[in-house]
Image (cartoon, rainbow, N blue to C red):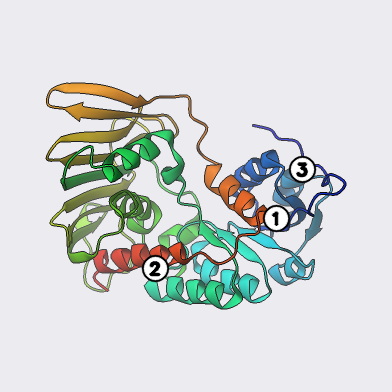
Amino acid sequence: MSASPASPARPGSSPRPRIGFLGVGWIGRHRMEAIAATGAAEIVAIADPSPETAAEAGKLAPAAKRVGTLESLLAEGLDGIVIATPSALHAEQSILALAAGAAVFCQKPLGRNAAEARAVVDAARAADRLLAVDLSYRFTDGMRRIREIVAAGGLGRIYAVDLVFHNAYGPDKPWFYDRAQSGGGCVMDLGVHLVDLALWTLGFPEIRDVSARLFAGGEPLGASPDRVEDYAVATLGLDTGTAVQLACSWRLQAGQDAVISAAFYGTEGGAALRNVNGSFYDFTAERFRGTARETLAAPPDAWGGRAAADWARRLAAGERYDSEAERLVEVAGALDRIYGR
């Protein structure tokens, strides 16, 4: 994909927010591309420990200054910063950016646990700055349609939610497998999306009880594991009476690249988002009535960068702290309970 660098603000218009990027690997560059395409913000600075990676990102924003550290980025007087670094760094870097007066768009997870997520949200509130996390599956056409139908009562009372995210590969960076750096394995990496989709679609009901089983290499993890999980199953009981079941994994012998689905079943019907032919990017969404089905959304749907683009537009519109950021702490708390901590 390609995108032209954002153009200067029109004469007489409000100055566009000046944003920087911390970490411009594949995901960081993709989000840069999405933000540049909106024209809502000016990309002024890039920081990455790899000169080659920074140079590649510089092709998307040739006028952006290349700097070495977060402190150097913030010295540019940024209005906002996009953070795409290893998970262990997210909370500290977000807090530093917010304290410096920059809005933050961060890769998931916002923190390795609910305490870290809480600290970031509190910093955003104190600084009165916009905070968002790249929970990108919310922005698929299919999930938006399903959420609208659920909110309107079209499926009746939702009593069951089934969520799956199996990745036939595993992360290629060693820090993912270090619990101190990652905060966890496939639950932290993939399960965060599943928990968020369920709670977001249902209006964030309270979680009453959680049970889970975690595995690594086919063996159950102990109480104090020295490895991160590569397979997990969990059930969340909500105060609405809804049972949410999820399963996620790395390197599962799934017969295809990925198995991804989010299905909602109610007293008056059902609806599900599912990936197509093992794709990580193509999804269909369907609504069920008995044995009949209706297509709600189908490929193509260029959803990957929409969360970043939405944050940039909101920043350009002058939005500041949004109390919906509290939901990030609720999702992190649910993951803590899956991990039994």
Q: Quadrant of the C terminus?
A: bottom left
Of helix, strand and loop, which one carries label 2? Answer: helix
What amino acid is at disc 1?
A: Ser
Q: Dot 1 lies on which element?
A: loop
Q: Is residue 102 visible?
A: yes
| Residue 167 visible in image | no
> Residue 196 placed where, x, y %?
35, 54
> Mark 1 touching mark 2, by CB under 8 A?
no
Q: Earlier in the sequence, mark 3 or mark 2?
A: 3
Q: Which residue is mark 2?
A: 329
Q: Picture coordinates of residue 204 (x, y %)?
A: 30, 58
Q: Is residue 54 left or right of residue 115?
A: right
- Going from the N terminus, do you reach mark 1 or mark 2 first? 1
Give the structural element (helix, strand or loop) at label 3: loop
Amino acid beneath label 3: Ala
- Compared to 259, does 297 lie above or below? above
Q: Residue at x 76, y 69 (%)?
A: 72
Instruction: Specify the amino acid type for callout 2.
Output: Val
